[in-house]
Image (spheres, coloured by chain):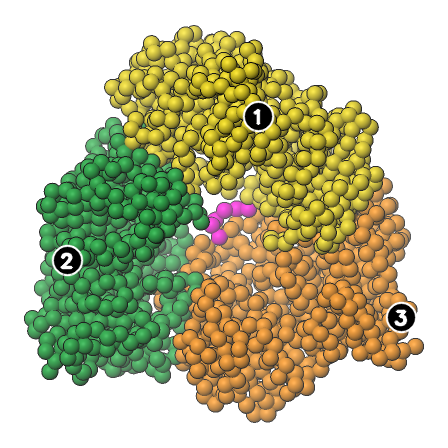
Chain colours: A green, B yellow, C orange
Amino acid sequence: MARRSSERPTTRRAPSAWPTTGLSYGGDYNPEQWAPEVWREDVRLMREAGVNIVTLGVFSWGLLEPRQGEYDWGWFDEVIGLLHDSGIAIDLATPTAAPPSWLLHEHPEILPVDADGVREQPGGRLGWCASSPVFREHALRITTALAERYGDHPAVRLWHVSNELGGGNARCYCEVTAARFREWLRAEYGTVEAVNAAWGTAFWGHTFTDLDHIEPPRREQHKVNPGLFLDFERFSSDELLGHYLAEAAVLRAHSEAPVTTNFMVGSGRHVVDYSDWARHVDVVANDHYTIVNDPVREQDLAFAADRMRGLTADRTPWLLMEHSTGAPSWQQRNRAKAPGEILRNALAHVARGSDGAMFFQWRASTAGAEQFHSAMLPHAGTESRVWREIVQLGDALRRLRGVAGSPVEPAKVALLVDEESAWALQQGLKPHRALRYTRETRLWHRVFWQRQVLVDVLPVDADLDGYDLVVLPTLFVVSDAQAARIEAFVRDGGTALVTYLSGVVDGTGRVRGGGYPGAFRDLLGITTEEFRPLQEGETVRLSDGGEVTDWTEDTNLHGAEAVVAYADGNSAGRAAVARHAVGEGAAWYVAAQLPLGSAERIADRLIDELGLPRAVEASSGIEAVRRRTPDGDVLFLVNHSDADETVAVSGQSLLDDASFDGKAVVPAGGVVVLREGAAE
Amino acid sequence: MARRSSERPTTRRAPSAWPTTGLSYGGDYNPEQWAPEVWREDVRLMREAGVNIVTLGVFSWGLLEPRQGEYDWGWFDEVIGLLHDSGIAIDLATPTAAPPSWLLHEHPEILPVDADGVREQPGGRLGWCASSPVFREHALRITTALAERYGDHPAVRLWHVSNELGGGNARCYCEVTAARFREWLRAEYGTVEAVNAAWGTAFWGHTFTDLDHIEPPRREQHKVNPGLFLDFERFSSDELLGHYLAEAAVLRAHSEAPVTTNFMVGSGRHVVDYSDWARHVDVVANDHYTIVNDPVREQDLAFAADRMRGLTADRTPWLLMEHSTGAPSWQQRNRAKAPGEILRNALAHVARGSDGAMFFQWRASTAGAEQFHSAMLPHAGTESRVWREIVQLGDALRRLRGVAGSPVEPAKVALLVDEESAWALQQGLKPHRALRYTRETRLWHRVFWQRQVLVDVLPVDADLDGYDLVVLPTLFVVSDAQAARIEAFVRDGGTALVTYLSGVVDGTGRVRGGGYPGAFRDLLGITTEEFRPLQEGETVRLSDGGEVTDWTEDTNLHGAEAVVAYADGNSAGRAAVARHAVGEGAAWYVAAQLPLGSAERIADRLIDELGLPRAVEASSGIEAVRRRTPDGDVLFLVNHSDADETVAVSGQSLLDDASFDGKAVVPAGGVVVLREGAAE
Amino acid sequence: MARRSSERPTTRRAPSAWPTTGLSYGGDYNPEQWAPEVWREDVRLMREAGVNIVTLGVFSWGLLEPRQGEYDWGWFDEVIGLLHDSGIAIDLATPTAAPPSWLLHEHPEILPVDADGVREQPGGRLGWCASSPVFREHALRITTALAERYGDHPAVRLWHVSNELGGGNARCYCEVTAARFREWLRAEYGTVEAVNAAWGTAFWGHTFTDLDHIEPPRREQHKVNPGLFLDFERFSSDELLGHYLAEAAVLRAHSEAPVTTNFMVGSGRHVVDYSDWARHVDVVANDHYTIVNDPVREQDLAFAADRMRGLTADRTPWLLMEHSTGAPSWQQRNRAKAPGEILRNALAHVARGSDGAMFFQWRASTAGAEQFHSAMLPHAGTESRVWREIVQLGDALRRLRGVAGSPVEPAKVALLVDEESAWALQQGLKPHRALRYTRETRLWHRVFWQRQVLVDVLPVDADLDGYDLVVLPTLFVVSDAQAARIEAFVRDGGTALVTYLSGVVDGTGRVRGGGYPGAFRDLLGITTEEFRPLQEGETVRLSDGGEVTDWTEDTNLHGAEAVVAYADGNSAGRAAVARHAVGEGAAWYVAAQLPLGSAERIADRLIDELGLPRAVEASSGIEAVRRRTPDGDVLFLVNHSDADETVAVSGQSLLDDASFDGKAVVPAGGVVVLREGAAE
């Protein structure tokens, strides 16, 4: 029941070739904003900056098809010709993120309906319900027309299905969607009795006598049945994926170029189940924007990049489709980047496996909702720091072209992330409603990131062969099969670190009886008889000196040994962190929301005991990752601190002519990339 | 006009017998969540814990009547038989809190409509409009069927009408409700001219020329006419009460067992007028949940219990129908209880007149919205502190069976609470919108609770004979008759303590002219010419050293003497607290939101001057109450502090074999219950 | 395109006479709340207080026309007669702010619809859509009837169209409004292509192929196209103005008395474009309420008054139509006024050009939504500080009657405010969404107010002749023509002070390319290549010792010289404040959100360099303004501080018999008004 969609067939095709020679560099190009004479200046400046690819057509539907079935290709042909003539590859977008005004005017039933039953209005993006057959028909018509016209154009090197699918239309509660949801339930469960059993509808008297009585979880969001909630999230992800697949099928029928769509993996909410979606894109691509008031936003970037790598087949390169040259405009106080931050951010992505660095967008808009979003070519024009750094970045990427296609050094640590756990934990009546799933995933990634230990961020179902340590941060929803895989990994000599609220519910959202953390109780040799969430401002001391906030548990040891204990409060004396020797390996349980220092002590011990490899040994401000090229290892060193740092390495700088004989100074805020070996 | 509903006939019946022999112990039992083999284990464990009653059927409608008019009694018969065979009494609920899915699917017009005109959706509880004739018909059909089948079943010892009526459907703004509201107005006022006069509709030009033009106060909540608002609140309470009475009439026609419904008196908003409702239940019953981040939540518990006692006829026992063994799940950070807190909480209710202690719910759910709500049998099972404390509590209640049926020692202090004042004060354009009615009622209860002085919390219309002191905290809405009763009480030798914003408006919500506190001006010998609300963070010093926040007044003495004066600010030199000798008694006015210390000084003086009895003399951490049994007084001592406390008492412990000769040590966090007398 | 409405013809008529002899004193009078015997007491007390005018009829529609087309004039005739007999002038309101209940019942389509598509409900004020032809018909019928009956009544000295137009119905999103908006666009732009070009709809693919596809900016408020947003704001202002003009035309056809409507210029949002509206009222009138928790609320009062004066033709007197004697009731904690504050507030308005001081309302309501709003005659009656101060104020205004009709001393500083900039800055995806337009306008007014330098607050299109300094605080939206006027002003010897985010977008909301502050780049001799908004709590030091919050910029000098530089942060070393000598004058640019101290240093330098006149030289707690009467200058000195202040002046006190020979002591919290000259 409620199978993970990852158990369904994949449609991923290995791309025959990467869209560009060397690393990809460019951004979204929306030429319809400008007069044709500007297009010519654009292409000239793209060449000056070293741009070799742009994403075209994202918002062009209304101009390509100004009236239903009538197409105006002329201007688009001209732009494509200009780019092609300049040797700039095209990542051609189906324009379905931006339905034309005439379509929304004639078919307002396309617009999504929110949980209160209010229909969205035109004026944003992605103003369509993924279940709408009317929208699907129109979307596939323009997709077909586009594919027919440009499917074998030599400049079209990649297809970009729509744009940030789910960004605005992730959930719809209209009647069409409701009917589709019931179809989905029928396919998943077969009978209404099976749904009742899975969701435990008997409580609050919600037993359904007919599948057709089931409605999406409208309005009563806080109080909705957890099984219904979780299945509606799954359905909604599937429904958007269905749209992607329908467009992709059209493209694949007309073109050999690989097909992708840009994910939105960052600090925001988990809109769809990317662990599943990744199995259907030929190139894994992401849009990543740092949250400007996040004090460790570089680590959020690294986390997202490590997750992208984890979503690829066999850790092959992926593509950073969008990031920003400076301030976004959708945040509250849109911070500009500091000098040097553009290079640091872009190369951190490349270090972690992106074969390129692309931006939203090429030229800053003067009109429209995003008129204040930064761009490669800012409002101030070429007489600007941003432009100079964009030219510098283009040069750096050209110098680094040798890493294209190369894998990142294999990681020994895997960290499992799970959209379903995120959805379930942050919804409804929970022990602690203010907990954020990403707080815990970020914490455990951070302690390794600060120690230059590479972590692969993986889907829950990923193959764990070759890893020494697997970290499961609050893996709330877990099936028996998944729990068994973790147990086998440990028995075979691996180490698992499981944190609080993991294993609590099964795949239908039901609590596993007999004490927490249900599915992992035996593996961990510990049970929790009661959760003890802390109030705002309340803290509990630990035996290691740390202070816990937000979350503690009343644990009982059944074979595990306490590593850290609670030193005061109602759980005093009980284990806050415990280790259980199992088979050839060991399983750790963290029963508290640890402060950074306590997590760091655990990371140090694990690095030591398991011999986890550090890329270099440096202070926590140094980010260090290796890519393995046929010509040897290329080491990326990014200095996030305010002080120059000396790192013990030897080799040849790839960004300039320097060579390093045993040590390299990475300037404050700077980046060093070197091909390792004896200094030349 | 707009009579208080308390002026209407009561339907209360004195119950012929209490549902259980001795104190009632048990909880909500929702067996439809579990397989029949679990039922057998449940009954076995209930006996182990000493459970003698459960509430059954709250969520069973959809399973008892899976299709309209078709009933499935078999499984329910089996559960009832199992309980009866084990000697466990049944508090049988009409299942109308949980309308079946088929009913909501076929009759969505049953669902309430909010003030914005949006209809609620299925998926919660109480998803019905109390004015819906369609729902009423279906609800009475299942109620009749249930009453016919089990009306004379010997296990059925109490009827539980629906569940927490108003929790989710307290207000509805649909057209059916609007029409019923107009009928209610017609019955209350007779003519549209009378409504216009009562509400003062001439202001803002709202004069109605036809009663049919009147609508519920939708959307314009902040700005609505206070009279319309207040009458809609009264109507809504009456409408829900009407539903209760309709179900109760069916039950009473088929069964001799007493009828109740579970109130929700705690820290939340005042949903309905329980002062009125209490006159229609055969047993007063309450659901009380502490607010986990309330630092004096034990006093909130005591307040609710004192109010329940105040709602009974002649201070007879009432029943704690629900409380929790640990964390709720509907709060933000659902704190677990500390060791010993279960016993402290349960016995504090018993001490204050509850002849039992019941919980939501028996066995923790694994599914459904409340899957993380604590229960008597937690997810962890019997190997848990909670279960051990539940067994311990069962034992304690068995030992205390002798107090069943006995009254609590008569109180000399009455504190008047009033839903109408709460509604009116917290709505609309008020001098200070952030004031909370419960802040002031809690404060004045607290100062006596901390001094072991028992307070009866009474409806405004209650008989005041026998009390020495009556406290009126912000009794905003008051009729002439009520004010006259208070004045007579004082003239006859009583003392009244009236706090700010009392007496300001009459029963139609109109300000009484001539200076505040209108209705009590003469009694108090003081007038307030202007309110001086304080800004956030602003304080005013008092002559007693205290610091006032939120509320001050420009008072003028007319016969009263200042007890405490303002020491700075714009009201400096004026009286903040004043006392007026009247007839044989005295009337105090508190013109400020006093800090705890200032209120304590007043309480100390009143205890001293009036000789108010303290149950024991102990520190503020000791809660002490006596029940008067035929075999002598039983004293409950609850220690809420972190240190052992010695109390001067003699007698025989009822919870163990200890005896006390002149003093008893109440352990930190512990409870001592003794039958007073010479130590044996 | 999208012409400023100020380019359209004005309908302002110079009033033949001021409504009262001497200064106007009174308030809103809503007699329908009271019995006729109260009317007689009212008139008696009005005379006692010196009231010479009241605003009558604001909420009387339902009582004057209880059924459509049937009028009941009797009671109104009686009230008017009573007032007239007592020599009290009438400001007669059309009662259209309060549509009768029967009208809303019969025509609910009149009620406005919000951006979510939900129709407002009866029960507030101004419950009508300004585009509704149905409402317009009814409103003009009652207006005509009123004008016909009282148009030449000798007591009717002023017409008061409706009440606070836009307060509650400023924006409507119904279908009738949408159709009117499309008509407005057609009139402004002619073609859909012109709209597309102006708004830059190509971005996000919003190109319209038909004007009829355009909808108001519903729901997607944050993300709406800036051009669409701005034009909908303009349209909404025009639509309400259209209603005013329709009523005004009826009144002018029947009466010689001047016509006004009460503006709402204060700290709230900019509801309509008063710069335009002012051109259509015969007397400029304002309702001003201080925000009780604003620590410099007296300066907000002065700002509003200076703006009113700036909206008059040639700085002629205007009228303070409403303010309060104490606590409002629509704020959170409605602070009462301090003793003396009534006089200080009222005379500060008079000092700044108001020929009167009126209040909402005469007698405090006992019922209705505003039952706790303060009034001239409070709930406490005449035995109250408020009443005594009201009588005192009446006496003061009578003594000051000589200033009636006189101009305020001409200001040398103009400060330009612009509703369009306020709308545009505070909407949508902006570099910093938490910036508030009024923060910056208030700052630059404040530094001069504290130095007794008079500032005229003017519309952007105002004539700048005679000013030495013009201040443009964040003038975000600016046309080429407006920018050229500022440049000409400077070249001719004026000084302009332009602050951050000025000149950034043109009149269609499009960013001006080439670097900020676009329109003023050349004038200022500076460009900003990148904005650097600061995060909450983040500060940047300045070379003058100040600390900037919220806003910094990366500036580059092109002819200007740095006055203040950034001392740390990413912009360190760049100019935060710069001065550019241009022609005969100078242009200053402030590229940061300056702290008060830094702005004060600039003000001091400008006062010094430009010789800006101070009314007196006193500490910052003294507010000082002169009015120029035929009998000499009258100087108003208001002491906002807690200490007596001595000011070097000579002359004769107008409030009492004092005379000043070289110095006057203004008591703490007191007011001195003197006719200047040698002491008598």
Expressed as whole percent of the image width and height from the top left, the position of residue C175 reads: 49, 52
Q: Looking at the rendered structure, which numbered label has been put on residue B171?
A: none
Could you tell me the amino acid type at mark 2?
A: Gly
Mark nearer the viewer, 3 or 1:
1
Q: Which residue is mark 3?
A: C658
Q: Which residue is mark 2?
A: A611
- Secondary element at tag 1: loop
Q: Is residue B169 magenta?
A: no
Q: Is residue C246 above or below residue B203?
A: below
Magenta span: predominant SS is loop
- Residue at the far right: name it: C680
- Is the C-beta separation of discs 3 and 2 under 8 Å? no
Q: Is residue A502 above or below residue A402?
A: above
Expressed as whole percent of the image width and height from the top left, the position of residue A291 reads: 36, 62
Could you tell me the amino acid type at mark 3?
A: Ala
Q: Is residue B230 above or below residue C643?
A: above
In the figure, is residue B105 to the left or right of B572? left
Mark nearer the viewer, 3 or 2:
2
State the residue in front, B17 or A650.
A650
Quarter holding the C terminus of chain A?
bottom left
State the residue in front, A77 or B568.
B568
Dot 1: within a 10 Å radius of its alpha carbon, few (fewer than 14), some, or many (20 or more) residues? few
Q: Quadrant of residue A34?
A: bottom left
Q: Which residue is mark 1?
A: B648
Quarter holding the N terminus of chain A?
top left
The answer to whether residue B222 of the structure is visible from this angle is: yes
Q: Which residues are magenta?
A: C115-121
Dot 2: within a 10 Å radius of its alpha carbon, few (fewer than 14), some, or many (20 or more) residues? few
Expressed as whole percent of the image width and height from the top left, the position of residue B12 reads: 57, 15
In the figure, is residue C416 to the left or right of B336? right
Could you tell me the amino acid type at mark 1?
A: Ala
